[in-house]
Amino acid sequence: MGGWTWGISGAIVALIVAGWASRVLAHRRSVIRELERGLVALGEGRPVRPTNTRVSGSLGRLARTFDALIPEHQAKVERLSSDIEQLRVVLGGMAEGVIAIDARRRLLFANKSADFLFGLGPQAVGRLVPELIRSPRFQEAVDATLTGPETYRGEIVVPSRDVMPRSLPRVLAVHGSLLPGSPPTGAVLVFHDVTELRRLERMRQDFVANVSHELKTPLASIKAYTETLLDWALHDEAVNVRFLNRIEEQADRLNQLILDLLSLARLESGHEVFHHGPLAVSAVVETCIETHVGRAEGKELDLKLDLGPVDESILVVADEEAVHQILDNLIDNAIKYTPAGGWVHVICQTTEAAVVVAVADSGIGIPRDDLPRVFERFYRVDKARSREMGGTGLGLSIVKHLIQSIGGEITVDSRLGEGTRFTVLLPRYQTKS
Ligand code: ADP
């Protein structure tokens, strides 16, 4: 072969080698690009495909290590996503409002309850919290959490977001803690609505104060009369019987108060056992009227009963003792608050679902502003007058509880100086046809 033939063969081999080398290089470059894309996807927590390359050398080893890491990494990402989802469900279902903010007071997260408590919209995340929640007390809690070395505990009052007009402001217990980091990266604040709790606490305190006062008044009278008797009046025939009668009156009052308190306590605790069954209500109304005839006559009151269509065949679903107590209280009040010469009428009617019993009087009446409050414990329009009449201020609240337990209703209408009408609805017993 001549020299030129060797030259041509050499050139061909060189071309083949160059082609092969450039294909290998291109493949290695594509593996590097795939690795780059994979790393970015890993960083963003997106799904990653393995390179499955068979390239040799250090690049091959790197690619195979990368491929081997993918399943483990993806399992971690899935676990993390499911943990985050769980956390979201837990936070979303919490009755407490949870808010997370960054160190610059931008909202990072708010759960559903926090959305509702503070009226945060869907665009709230990322915005400055002082712009979203314009409450100085709220900002104080945020400041104290972000600056204080310890977790913050306090209470704030914020306007109610209830649609009902005149809704009371909400009282929120706040628990604020810093997010980890040095300096801290923000804070988490948890808000627990304690409005109802505080209201009940206030009611309990008022109740204790009222009971103490109501007990002290007759006791003070008993003590004063007894001291006077011991001092000088015991042997004074003109006054000693009068004083002893006063002592008996005050003791009766104390007794009535304690009986009413026990009755109310049993009703409120739900321990009072009633047997709400079919009951002929006419007989109960008649018995109640009979027990009050004497008192009505003594005050020259016209006490009348109109049973209307309610005969012994008309039944309600109620406990006899409960109905008796309700009517007894209402008739007793009507007689108590009607001046001599007036009238007290008990009128019965029926509707398809209820027996309606109205206790009406021509008495002193109740001012309009007091009407919604007469069923509250110890609420009296005229304290002195009620006490003078032997009232405890508990009768109507006992009535309200009894009616609730029966599943009935009670309403009151009144005109000052003209009279009052309490109307009770007792559910009728429906006979199956
Ligand atoms: P009390 O023991 O004071 O009568 P109640 O709970 O029975 O307590 O009634 C609460 C208040 O409602 C009374 O103090 C009285 O001011 C008012 N009230 C109740 N019934 C009547 C009525 N028939 N006429 C006028 N006022 C009434």
Image (spheres, grey):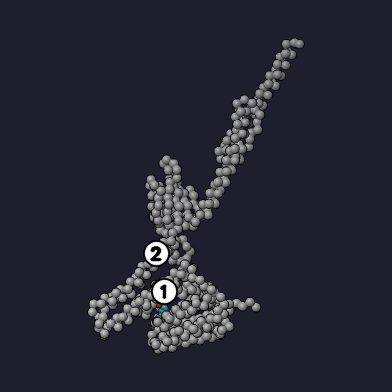
Label 1 sits on a secondary structure element that is helix
Q: Which mark is residue 259?
A: 1
Q: State how many labels appear.
A: 2
Question: Residue visible at 46% across and 70% down?
Answer: 266
Residue projecting furthest to the front: 235
Q: Position of residue 294 (x, y in %)?
A: 42, 87
Q: On the image, which quarter does residue 248 sit in?
A: bottom left
113 w.r.t. 255: above or below: above
Residue type beneath disc 1: Leu
In the displayed orientation, state which residue is furthest to the left. 232
**Residue 96 in the image, given as x and y percentages of width and height:** 48, 55
Please, what secondary structure does the residue beneath circle 2 have? Answer: helix
Q: Please tell me whether mark 2 or mark 1 is closer to you in this view.
A: 1
Quadrant assignment, res 335 = bottom left
* Residue occupying the far right of the picture: 1
| Image-quarter location of ligand 1 | bottom left
Name the residue nearer the viewer: 109 or 279.
279
Q: CA distance from mark 2 to mark 1?
A: 24 Å
For marks 2 and 1, the one nearer the N-term is 2
* Residue 359 vs residue 181, the one in the foreground: 359
- On the rendered image, what quadrant is the C terminus found in? bottom right
Position of 50 relative to 275 (above/below): above
- Residue 360: give x, y in percent of width and height: 46, 83
Seen at 28% across and 76% down, the residue is 226
Disc 2 marks which amino acid? Arg
Please say whether residue 404 is visible from this viewpoint: yes
Indicate the position of residue 160 as horizontal and vertical percent values. 44, 61
> Could you tell me which residue is drawn at 31 percent across and 76 percent down?
222
- The residue closer to the viewer here, 255 or 77, is 255
Instruction: State the residue at coordinates (43%, 88%).
Output: 302
Q: Which mark is residue 202?
A: 2
